[in-house]
Image (cartoon, rainbow, N blue to C red):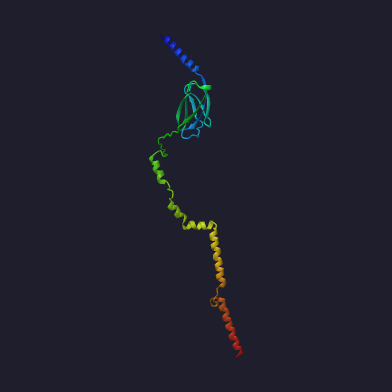
Amino acid sequence: MKKLIGILFLFASLSVFAQQQEKPLVQFTGVIYNADSTTSVVPYVSVTNISYHNTTTIANYRGYFSFVAHEQDTIRFTAIGFAPVTVVIPANVSNKSYVAKIKITPQINNLPTFRVFPWATTDEFRRDFIAAKLADDDLEIARKNVSRASLAALSNTLPRDGQEIQSANAQAMHNNIVNSHSITNPLLNPLAWGSLIKSITEGDKSRNSEN
């Protein structure tokens, strides 16, 4: 009985294999497109022949593929970020060639949140948290930038801009004009006082000599 079952199983396997071999060969060619765009191709898509030992080929960078398969073979297209698509090659293909335009749809996979904590214990976290130096906020940064020490350091290192140079030149020209037209009071000059006293003294001497 066991031998009979084994013989029947062998004949069934040979029959399936013969049917597979009897299917006509077809040159399956196509281009893989993004279903959300009519012109955007999807490169490097895995093309698997599920009906023939899961034979896999890869489309090129333009989404083009071409390989030999059998009529009525089931072909699966898979790519990262896209939903898989299954295509069955029809029977009685003319010219032993089947051309298809494959469209695959983008697929978003939401992964669960994964949190990484660099501290092994809560004591280590507490110690690092207490010792941590907080960064300055915008107000503190602005206060440091306009402090007296910062402005003094900048004035010593930064060159003057065009507006500062123009203001300094204008002030110098104004001072020269004012000083050139000003009348100086001789009584406010110590040298003038010396000359006045000398002239008075000489005048007194000349008068005494005349008398």
Location of residue 34 in the rendering, given as x and y in whole percent from the top left corner: 48, 33
Q: Compare residues 121 and 64 and report the one nearer the observer.
A: 64
Location of residue 108 in the rendering, given as x and y in whole percent from the top left corner: 43, 34
Residue at x-position 52% and y-position 22%: 94
Note whether 129 is above or below 192 in the view shown: above
Q: Compare residues 211 and 81 and report the one nearer the observer.
A: 81
Location of residue 53 in the rendering, given as x and y in whole percent from the top left corner: 48, 21
How many numbered markers are drawn? 0
Residue at the outermost front position: 94
Residue at x-position 55% and y-position 64%: 170
The quarter holding residue 211 reads bottom right
Residue at the outermost bottom position: 211
The quarter holding residue 202 reads bottom right
Note whether 17 is above or below 44 in the view shown: above
The quarter holding residue 194 reads bottom right
Location of residue 99 in the rendering, given as x and y in whole percent from the top left corner: 51, 26
Q: Compare residues 189 and 70 and report the one nearer the observer.
A: 70
Residue at x-position 56% and y-position 66%: 173
Note whether 52 is above or below 60 in the view shown: above
Q: Compare residues 138 and 94 and report the one nearer the observer.
A: 94
The quadrant of the rendering that contains the N terminus is top left
